[in-house]
Amino acid sequence: MLRTAPPETVEQAHAEAFAKLTPEQRQKVLADLGSEVPESERARSTDPQEMARMATRAEMRQPGTMERTLGGGAGAAAWAAAWGWAA
């Protein structure tokens, strides 16, 4: 979906997935992903919509950013759980 859907659809899917995470999981994803994006595009909080905007822009600019950034550990497990995937 990420490679073929319009950015608005991708952002909405990201927001829904981020909303399913615990505050601690969102903080971990924010820290991990935030270190991979330009400062001007970093989310300033763990608000799911703000994080979704950051994730979507990162994916549009460089597909696979989420997978590479969360490639293992707690961040990847949390993200997989939020999307309903097995980690």
Image (cartoon, rainbow, N blue to C red):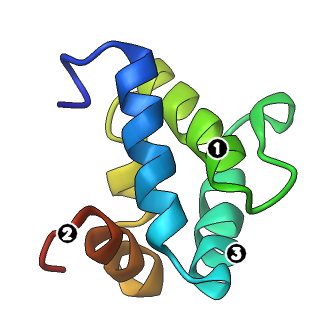
From this view, report whether residue 80 is shown above or below residue 58: below
Q: Amino acid at mark 2?
A: Gly
Q: Residues within 10 Å of mark 1 (few under 14, many from 20)?
A: many
Q: Residue at x 42, y 66 (%)?
A: 70
Please tell me whether mark 2 sits on a helix, a strand or a loop.
loop
The image position of residue 6, as x and y in percent, is 33, 13
Q: Secondary structure at mark 3?
A: helix
Q: Residue at x 83, y 58 (%)?
A: 45
Q: CA distance from mark 3 to mark 1?
A: 14 Å
Left or right of 84 on screen, residue 57? right
Which of the image's four quarters has the C terminus? bottom left
Q: Looking at the image, is 81 positioned above or below residue 48?
A: below
User: Mark 3 near mark 1, Cβ–Cβ under 8 Å?
Assistant: no
Q: Which residue is mark 3?
A: 27
Determine which of the numbered discs, if any, sits on residue 49 in the image. Answer: 1
Query: For residue 4, which quarter of the picture?
Result: top left
Precedes in sequence: disc 3 or disc 1: 3
> Which residue is drawn at the image coordinates 17% and 31% (left, top)?
1
